[in-house]
Image (cartoon, grey):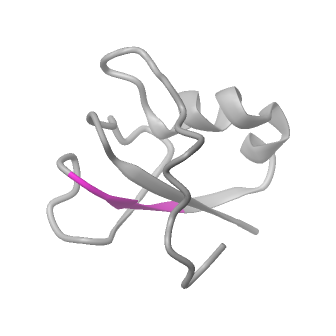
Amino acid sequence: RHSEYPDFSEGLILRQGATVEDACRAIHKSLLDNFKYALVWGRSAKHNPQRVGITHELSDDDVVEIVRK
């Protein structure tokens, strides 16, 4: 949820080179239908948070917030 501290107890494990699209699919494929953008905190972001599209490649320990339409 927005403005809440992320819950690190349940992480999502993805392959190296995974994108925001892969993360959405791993959670639930219906997220792709209403995807607007994602906010990313971590090594793959140029600044924290960075607003990214569905093709953004994620890095280890990134935190992602998915925003839907």
Does residue 39 show up magenta in the picture?
A: yes
The image shows residue 62 at horizontal and vertical percentages of 34, 47
Left or right of 21? Residue 68 is: right
Left or right of 58? Residue 66 is: right
Residue sitting at 71 percent across and 35 percent down?
27
Residue furthest bottom as drawn: 3
The image shows residue 63 at horizontal and vertical percentages of 41, 54
The C terminus lies in quadrant:
bottom right
Q: Quadrant of residue 7?
A: bottom right
Residue sitting at 24 percent across and 71 percent down?
48
Depicted 46 relative to depicted 20: above or below: below
Residue furthest top as drawn: 15
Chief SS of the magenta region? strand
Residue sitting at 54 percent across and 85 percent down?
3
Depicted 54 relative to depicted 60: above or below: below
User: Depth check: 29 or 11 in front?
Assistant: 11
Magenta range: 38-42
Left or right of 65? Residue 28 is: right
Q: Quadrant of residue 47?
A: bottom left
Residue sitting at 14 percent across and 61 percent down?
46
Q: Quadrant of residue 41?
A: bottom left
The N terminus lies in quadrant:
bottom right
The image shows residue 23 at horizontal and vertical percentages of 56, 34
